[in-house]
Amino acid sequence: KAGVTQTPRYLIKTRGQQVTLSCSPISGHRSVSWYQQTPGQGLQFLFEYFSETQRNKGNFPGRFSGRQFSNSRSEMNVSTLELGDSALYLCASSLGGVLEAFFGQGTRLTVV
Amino acid sequence: AQSVAQPEDQVNVAEGNPLTVKCTYSVSGNPYLFWYVQYPNRGLQFLLKYITGDNLVKGSYGFEAEFNKSQTSFHLKKPSALVSDSALYFCAVRHMNRDDKIIFGKGTRLHILP
């Protein structure tokens, strides 16, 4: 059974650009969550999608957005990139409820 | 609002000694509690969870955790540490009976000294 797949693994972007990250969940998982990981802040929750609907949202500016497709694949978009957006972005999928989330290996975004 | 605290940024333990990584939580109602581990340049791997029932939960790689409702704690333990246990450990909480997001602590870096 394939795990959570995130693409690309590494990205370098310039300030002001935008970026789209992709996440393919484990087959059958309808919940996809996104997290930003930085050394100083730990894991910060961005948003969660369930059956194409945003179910929860963290405290990030509107530059951060996401969506989920009918096949449960999810994308995250960051517009007008800032240096502080440099981080490891992690995607996790689950069946929801009591069940644990499974994480992808992440996308390392560097903004220069 | 739910929250998780891991009071120690780093824990150092000699190989073969018991280890404890601390976690306390705050949530209204009953929680789902999780521990995850992250190795360098990798995503998070699930270790164990508490849903209900026995307060002592056993998980992967010989780890266990004890749920203490009165102290709102969920400390991760292992009787005998291995050098390969060195990693970043995250505690997480999700509110029971609601489809709420999973909130993670800031993580504790565990160093096992040979």
Image (cartoon, coloured by chain):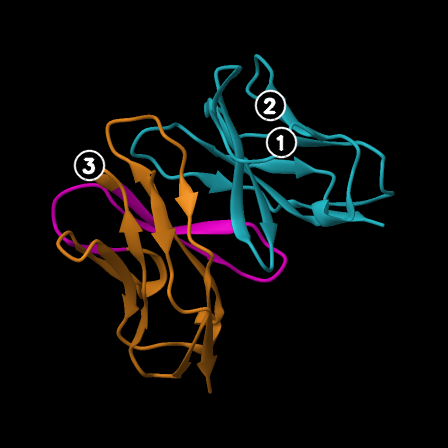
Where on the picture, by quarter, is residue B76? bottom left
| Magenta segment boundaries in residue numbering | B32-58
Number of the label disc, if any, that sits on residue A23: 1
Tell whether B99 sits left or right of A2: left
Colour assignment, chain B: orange
Q: Which residue is mark 3?
A: B29
Up the image or down, B43 lies above or below B107; here it is above
Q: Determine the main secondary structure of the stretch shown in magenta.
A: strand
Number of the label disc, if any, that sits on residue A73: 2
Q: Amino acid at mark 1?
A: Cys
Work out how far the residue at label 2 is from the one at label 1, CA to CA, in angstroms. Answer: 6 Å
Characterize the local packing of mark 2: few (<14), some (14-19) or many (20 or more) Cα atoms within 10 angstroms: many
Colour assignment, chain A: cyan
Work out how far the residue at label 2 is from the one at label 3, CA to CA, in angstroms. Answer: 32 Å
Residue shown at 26%/74% (left/top)? B79
Q: Are marks 2 and 3 on the same chain?
A: no
Please state the chain letter of the residue tagged with numbered disc 2 in the rendered image: A
Residue shown at 58%/59% (left/top)? A40
Q: Give A93 or A46, whichever is nearer the viewer.
A: A46
Q: How many marks?
A: 3
Where is residue B112? Give x, y as percent: 45, 79
Please state the chain letter of the residue tagged with numbered disc 3 in the rendered image: B
